[in-house]
Amino acid sequence: MSALHNINDTGMTVAALALGSNVGDRFHNIELALRLLEVPRANLSSEDLQQCNADVYAAVVDTSFLYETSPMYVTDQPSFTNCACLLETNIPPLILLRLLKRIETTVGRVPSIRNGPRAIDLDIVFYGAQVIDTRSPSERNSLENLTGQLVVPHPRISEREFVLRPLNDMIPDFVHPVLKESISNLFDALPEKDPSLRRVIPFPRYPLPTDYAWAYPDVPVVPPTLTYWSYPITGNEAPLYPTQRKTHLMSTLNATPDSFSDGAIHNTLETAMSFARESIDAGASIIDIGGYSTRPGAAFVSREEETNRIVPIVKAIRDVDASSSDLDGQLKEVLISIDTFRWEVARASILAGANCINDVYAFTGREDAWPLVDADAIQRSEECMAGMKSVAREFAVPVILMHSRGDAGKNKDYGKYGPGPGVVIRGVQIELGVKVECIIKGRGSVRRWMVIVDSGIGFSKTVEGNLEVLRDGASIVADVQVDGSS
């Protein structure tokens, strides 16, 4: 569900919430708050529970990108991480407000100056399309008396880029019930935008530190953050705020005997570790480890065999003695992505120390046929989607989702997307976009900020098609109309 609505015949409302953090592990704090939101029975007071539906319910059904922003109002404090989410719930608005305050306390927010540093900040921006103000009419001419009160829509939304931009990611066409303007129009009308604002992707630390204590039994463990990448905002034009940025290099380590690039070269632990050290020395930011070749005609590999090829390498990297050399110190902390389409392999690899999933089939499974029409193949694809989403969500890892069309050497015709130039780009936007929508929306979905898209150069594209994608790759993530929706 991606649109806000008022209470329907199921008793559900979709609310838009804004989240921010600038104290401690910001990404951990935000993820923990989102998980606590989905177990309201464990976080509401007994009095509030008595006023709720017996089947009290709250589910995060969409998220924005994640942004690093400069502080507003009180500027002498660390940068914030901000985002927004859509929450489907049957919790009444005042009780939802109290739930947010209890979660803020649980995550670690302590009293501070107004607009000052905080471990977590949770605000109700919209509650469906309702207009709510719990203050007496005589108090409604000021915004200095909001403590303990609920005013929805949030009264300061029109001046806050760190709220409007995340909302614009999810609900650009939603019309503000008081201002009578769409979110996209309110965003465009901002008098100025933060020149330092960037999107961010956090990478969690695995395996979990041996002394890592978890005090929240009602939700899955949220890992600490190992590092994060930031990148400028792009769209239909050049980067919005062009600044100096780091280019992250991925090194590919194929622990396979038949890979198209380095088969049988790094399929022993000794040669794999040697290559990993060479990669770090050459400037790699992340090492991608695969145990199942994606080349056309590659031999079948069982789940067990794929796991046994990958996991020992991941463990060996994480077990390196960091004190032995500067190079090994960097190797021990390097990001590791796992090139797999199997959730069982992904899970085992993350537990061993991987930080990211790289799936050339974008969670839809390895099927040579395209498009899928066979009922059994469709069922396998749906099971793969459910399994991969579950692992990515549970472990809070970024996912790289690639465009593909079954057998990489086939299905190169994009004529259905129209004549002339740009048809391959259009095909990638639509076909990969449909998969991404399935992955980031609905209960149990992957956070939008955790998704990295790969246009799939070399997969089901002619030479000309590959060149088209290379020339205009940024447009893959541009805002475009796709079958009547953005």
Image (spheres, rainbow, N blue to C red):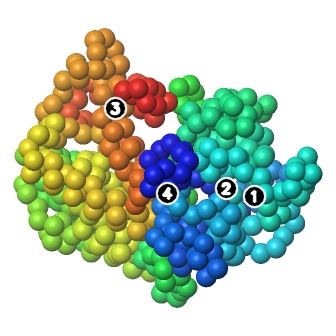
Q: Nearer the viewer, mark 1 or mark 3?
A: 1
Q: Is residue 237 visible?
A: yes
Nearer-the-camera pick, 321 or 50: 50
Q: Do tag 1 and tag 2 residues touch (Cβ < 8 Å)?
A: yes
* Circle 1 SS class: loop
* Circle 3 SS class: helix
**Which of the marked residues, 1 or 4, is nearer the chain's N terminus?**
4
Q: Nearer the viewer, mark 4 or mark 2?
A: 4
Residue 423 vs residue 218: left or right?
Answer: left
Is the residue marked by circle 3 packed among few (<14), some (14-19), or many (20+) residues within 10 Å?
some
Report the disc number at residue 11. Answer: 4
Picture residue at 35% right of the left edge, 47% below the top: 438
**Which of the marked residues, 1 or 3, is nearer the chain's N terminus?**
1
* Circle 2 SS class: strand
Q: Which residue is mark 1?
A: 150
Nearer-the-camera pick, 375 or 398: 375
- Above or below residue 62? Residue 121 is below
**Which of the marked residues, 2 or 3, is nearer the chain's N terminus?**
2
Report the disc number at residue 430. Answer: 3
Q: Nearer the viewer, mark 2 or mark 3?
A: 2
To which quarter of the image does residue 374 belong? top left
Q: Nearer the viewer, mark 1 or mark 2?
A: 1
Q: What's under tag 1, amino acid-wise?
A: Leu
Q: Which residue is mark 2?
A: 124
Residue 325: where, in percent of width, then height?
49, 74
To which quarter of the image does residue 300 belong? bottom left
Q: Do tag 1 and tag 3 residues touch (Cβ < 8 Å)?
A: no
Q: Could you tell me how far apart the alpha carbons at marks 4 and 3 are, in whole angstroms?
A: 34 Å
Is the residue marked by circle 1 packed among few (<14), some (14-19), or many (20+) residues within 10 Å?
some
Residue 444: where, in percent of width, then height?
40, 60
